Image (cartoon, rainbow, N blue to C red):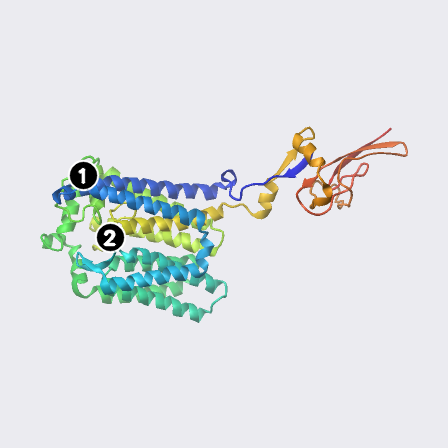
């Protein structure tokens, strides 16, 4: 029997371990289901307002479908064409620089909507740069942490860059855009990076204490303080700051356990503001009931578990940081939105990831999923030695490919190290490859050899009654 090497793919789905495959499937499945639910609910929640504005009832749903197509295309590109290790190089600084430029443009020439200046118009496209800035900022922090752990930068330089990025968040997002939600998400992402990097809890506690002090100082001023107290007692100002939360609660109350049915929401008839964006979870609760709302929550929990397991199976620490931090901020934003909608937290104006209407949020979320999947696909690749071992297959003498092999010009080949079975600790001895028959001193020896084709090195010898790395030989008297 002859053993030859065959070319095998680097990432064979059949060879991917189950510990890598099922988290990947969980993340992909939950993401696709959430996007599909979002398309249906955006159509339902926005149809009445579109009709009131004398546009097609499906106008917002059609836009959302286009955004989903762009986001899924970018997700595939980031997952399959851009290895996550590229983010350890200059590509991260490009992403961060682009994010800073967009944030600065928003502060300078951005358009103001709903009392906040968070959008910038680029031709016919309206972007919310803070959604994409989350990606650039976390990539930069992950790279800095990786460089620090590898000894490429000193601890003092890491602290300086880390502090500068936090200052960037406070200045360009919290104060310039009055965006409390995105600020909270970025801070949680940085805490996740520190936790995944196994930084001492004492240092994490110091950072968290500083954030709490700054947060209290920022929330105690202006309209933020009014919004903070309005969610605690919304009925005290029914027609003012509490109007949106009260009608959100009405929606959940009317939905009950099984819901009023898709398309049968009453609050979307211009009673509930932002029904298709920030408060789409209230429409889900009204039309799909408690069961539908719990199903959406369950999908985000599946996404969380799958994403954290993908981070656990990452090939290196940088992959763990990327995958874990993106998972945590996506799920945190989801529960932040749902907490605001049901009245457990003050309204922050953040959409429900994958579900709410809006191109910036959907595309940014799918881009983060693409980077997470890039880490997962790298985890599924077999090591070099395993791929070489799996590429060996038996070749029978009667096979046509064997006859073609033995007729090859051996002088042009590089014969590799031969592997096989070694008996009694005998070492490989150099010998000429091939089948041989020898008759000497009345003894006829028939040797059977096992060759490894396509490797380089030596072949073992066949001796009567011996076993080598090249094969084994059996002898009998003639």
**Quarter of the image that includes the C terminus:** top right
Question: For residue 255, which numbered disc appears in the image?
Answer: 1
Which is in the foreground here, disc 2 or disc 1?
2
Q: What residue is shown with label 2?
A: 124
Examine the rendering and report whether any part of residue 152 can be seen.
yes
Does 296 sit above or below residue 155? Answer: above
Q: Nearer the viewer, residue 90 or 464?
A: 90
> Disc 2 or 1, which lies upstream in sequence?
2
Residue in the image at 71% along x and 35% along y: 406
Examine the rendering and report whether any part of residue 142 can be seen.
no
Question: For residue 335, which numbered disc appears in the image?
Answer: none
Name the spot of residue 31 as percent of width and height, x first: 34, 43
Name the spot of residue 165 as percent of width and height, x first: 35, 65
Does 179 sit above or below residue 259? Answer: below
Residue at the outermost right position: 441
What is the quadrant of residue 209 in the picture? bottom left
Does 403 sit above or below residue 30? Answer: above
Element marked by disc 1: helix
Name the spot of residue 187 as percent of width and height, x first: 32, 60
Residue in the image at 34% along x and 48% along y: 366
Counting labels gives 2
**Quarter of the image that includes the N terminus:** top right
Residue in the image at 60% along x and 44% along y: 388
Residue in the image at 30% along x and 61% along y: 102
Horizontal arrangement in the rendering, residue 272 relative to residue 473 (left or right) = left
Q: Nearer the viewer, residue 143 or 46?
A: 46
Name the spot of residue 118 as percent of width and height, x first: 23, 59
């Amino acid at each position: 029997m002859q053993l030859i090497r065959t070319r095998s793919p680097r990432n064979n789905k059949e060879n991917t371990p189950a510990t890598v495959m099922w988290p990947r499937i969980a993340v992909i499945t939950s993401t696709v289901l959430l996007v599909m639910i979002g398309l249906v609910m955006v159509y339902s929640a926005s149809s009445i307002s579109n009709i009131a504005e004398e546009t097609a009832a499906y106008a917002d749903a059609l836009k959302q479908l286009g955004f989903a197509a762009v986001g899924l295309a970018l997700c595939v590109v980031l997952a399959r064409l851009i290895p996550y290790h590229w983010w350890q190089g200059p590509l991260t600084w490009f992403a961060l620089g682009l994010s800073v430029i967009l944030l600065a443009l928003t502060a300078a020439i951005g358009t103001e909507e709903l009392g906040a200046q968070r959008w910038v118009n680029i031709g016919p496209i309206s972007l919310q740069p803070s959604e994409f800035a989350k990606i650039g900022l976390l990539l930069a922090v992950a790279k800095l942490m990786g460089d620090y752990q590898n000894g490429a930068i000193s601890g003092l330089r890491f602290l300086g860059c880390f502090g500068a990025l936090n200052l960037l968040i406070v200045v360009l997002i919290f104060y310039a855009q009055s965006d409390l939600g995105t600020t909270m998400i970025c801070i949680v992402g940085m805490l996740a990076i520190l936790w995944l990097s196994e930084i001492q809890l004492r240092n994490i506690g110091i950072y968290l204490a500083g954030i709490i002090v700054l947060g209290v100082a920022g929330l105690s001023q202006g309209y933020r303080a009014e919004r903070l107290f309005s969610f605690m007692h919304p009925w005290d100002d029914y027609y003012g700051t509490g109007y949106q939360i009260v009608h959100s609660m009405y929606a959940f109350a009317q939905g009950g356990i099984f819901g009023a049915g898709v398309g049968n929401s009453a609050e979307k008839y211009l009673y509930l503001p932002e029904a298709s964006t920030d408060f789409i979870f209230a429409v889900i609760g009204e039309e799909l009931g408690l069961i539908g709302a719990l199903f959406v929550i369950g999908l985000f929990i599946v996404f969380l578990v799958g994403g954290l397991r993908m981070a656990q199976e990452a090939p290196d620490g940088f992959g763990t940081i990327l995958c874990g931090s993106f998972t945590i901020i996506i799920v945190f934003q989801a529960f932040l939105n749902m907490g605001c909608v049901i009245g457990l937290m003050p309204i922050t104006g953040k959409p429900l990831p994958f579900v709410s209407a809006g191109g910036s949020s959907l595309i940014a979320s799918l881009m983060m999923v693409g980077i997470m999947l890039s880490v997962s696909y790298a985890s599924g690749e077999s090591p070099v030695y395993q791929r070489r071992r799996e590429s060996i297959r038996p070749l029978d003498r009667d096979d046509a490919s064997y006859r073609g092999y033995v007729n090859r010009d051996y002088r042009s080949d590089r014969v590799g190290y031969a592997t096989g079975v070694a008996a009694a600790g005998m070492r490989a001895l150099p010998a000429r490859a091939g089948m041989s028959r020898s008759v000497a001193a009345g003894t006829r020896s028939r040797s059977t050899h096992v060759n490894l084709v396509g490797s380089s090195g030596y072949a073992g010898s066949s001796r009567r009654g011996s076993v080598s790395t090249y094969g084994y030989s059996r002898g009998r008297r003639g």
